[in-house]
Amino acid sequence: MKKNNLSVLIIVLISLISGRVNAQQRSNQAGYYHLSIGDFEIIALADGTVPVDAKALLNNDNKIPALLKKEFLSDTVETSINTYLIRAEKRLILVDAGSGNLFGPHFGGALINSFRKAGFKPEEVTDILITHIHLDHTGGLSSSGKMIFPNAIVHINQKEVDFWKIHEKVNDSDTRGIISNRQSYLSFKTYLDAGRVRTFSGDTTLFPGLSAHEYAGHTAGHTVYALDSKGKKLVFWGDLIHVTAIQFSDAGIPNEYDFDKVKAAAQRKKAYAQAADGGYFIAADHISFPGIGHVRRDVDGYIWIPVNYSIEK
């Protein structure tokens, strides 16, 4: 992509990014957190944060100011960009790949630094599970047309690939979501062109104890991934939530970048209820790092319970 086109991409996002929060990435944060789920080891890896104008992102719903104030937050919320490593026998599996340099020099882009701090190398990744193709989920797959994870197979819902094959080239009818996320598809396409992509349809088992479940709405093939081992369960939510203080109180509030806003709201409601009733762990890409915890019901919706900090793996 030419430099001027990349500039347009950043400008499109600027209404969701405010300078009132200094989110420049700092190297003095650990950037990783370990958790065991049965036979699996989970390592949360921080890709940094991005400041988001909550009202603009969530369609200026009139409930937003009071909900933010209740959680001691301003209109601009510094939102985590989380990715996750799964150690499973001989596989090292990455769930989503962060934003790379697509948010510019001050936001996101810390994934590889977190990798190294946690003791891993990008070359060691055998598989990458993509929840959907958006800036902060596939932007970190490639840089200048070069694969950052050269030995990995990328797994993704076929509907995501089909959607972007149609919208790969610029068209006058492109929506804001398509315009702002096209570069993230091109980052993914590096693997597609190299024959390193495996697609699936609907709900399927990818590896023993690890399954994919379609929750389309936010995008055409938005997918969550579930780990089950020795009676423990963790579900990787992708973009089922962006601002915890608001969307757990009202799952029906639309997201500016939901491909199908009605369907996306229904998927959030279903996922929140399932998590609360099932009592299992959630790992979410945009809940404050490490983004791992539980959901429980409350009078007015749901409450997020962060994982209890532990020095054990």
Image (cartoon, grey):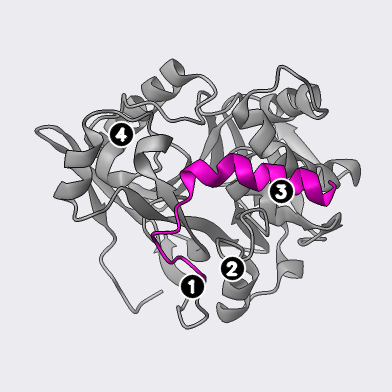
Q: Are marks 3 and 2 in contact (CB under 8 Å)?
A: no
Name which of mark 3 and mark 4 comes first in the sequence.
Answer: 3
Name which of mark 3 and mark 1 comes first in the sequence.
Answer: 3
Looking at the image, the residue that sits furthest to the bottom is 28
Q: Nearer the viewer, residue 120 or 264?
A: 264
On whether residue 3 falls in the magenta region, the answer is yes
Q: Which residues are magenta?
A: 1-25
Query: From what the image shows, is residue 127 above or below residue 239?
Result: below
Name which of mark 1 and mark 4 comes first in the sequence.
Answer: 1
Residue 74: assigned label: none
Pointer 1 local density, CA inside 10 Å: few below 14, some 14–19, many at least 20: many
Residue 272: assigned label: 4
Q: CA distance from mark 1 to mark 4?
A: 27 Å
Residue 7: assigned label: 3
Residue mark closest to the camera, 3 vs 2: 3
Q: Which residue is mark 1?
A: 31
Looking at the rendered structure, the kind of residue marked 1 is Gly
Q: CA distance from mark 4 to mark 2?
A: 29 Å
Name the quadrant containing residue 55: top left
Residue mark closest to the camera, 4 vs 2: 2
Q: Which residue is mark 2?
A: 110
Looking at the rendered structure, the kind of residue marked 2 is Ala
Provide the secondary structure element on which disc 3 rests: helix
Residue mark closest to the camera, 1 vs 4: 1
Provide the secondary structure element on which disc 1 rests: loop
Query: From what the image shows, is residue 179 above or below residue 8?
Result: above
Pointer 4 local density, CA inside 10 Å: few below 14, some 14–19, many at least 20: many
Pointer 2 local density, CA inside 10 Å: few below 14, some 14–19, many at least 20: many
Query: Who's the residue at 48% across and 72% down the image?
Result: 32
Relative to 138, is 273 on the left or the right? left
Q: Position of residue 27 (x, y in %)?
A: 52, 80
Residue mark closest to the camera, 3 vs 4: 3
